[in-house]
Image (cartoon, rainbow, N blue to C red):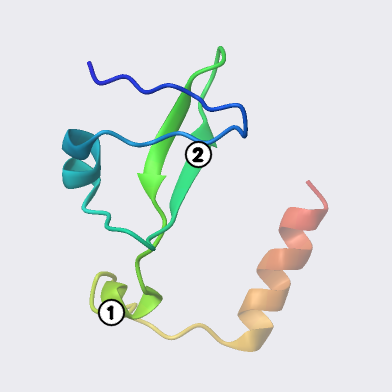
Amino acid sequence: MSTATITSKGQVTIPVSVRQRLGVQPGDRVGFIEMENGVFQLVAASWDIRSMKGQVSKPAKAVTIEEMNETIESRGRA
């Protein structure tokens, strides 16, 4: 397990091994996600949204605005 010390300003230096595994470099951003019982997950938050292109396939059938509105309305009543 890698550890770090919090400075009086609340800053933490992320150990090299963790930075390498996250794939982050100076200037990149990281996020802290609260899981449960006081546990937080550290994630790289510096990816460009364009890097996700092609990750999700197109739907088999296009959905109309009317179908979207009907679904939103029906779920709002639940």
Q: Is residue 48 left or right of residue 36?
A: left
Point 29% across, 71% down: residue: 56
Q: Is residue 33 left or right of residue 43?
A: right
Estimate the x, y position of residue 41 in percent, counting from the top left. 42, 32
Q: Residue furthest top?
A: 37
- Identify residue type, mark 2: Phe
Where does label 1 land, which residue? Answer: 53
Q: Is residue 29 above or below residue 39?
A: below
Task: Say how many tags the image has.
Answer: 2
Callout 1–callout 2 Cβ contact below 8 Å:
no
User: Residue 75: where, in percent of width, then height?
Assistant: 72, 55
Q: Which mark is residue 66?
A: none
Query: Eyeballing the image, is 56 above or below 1?
Result: below
Question: In the rendered structure, which disc, 1 or 2, sits on the residue that comes first in sequence?
Answer: 2
- Determine whether 46 is above or below 78 in the image: below
Between 53 and 63, the residue placed more toward the observer is: 53
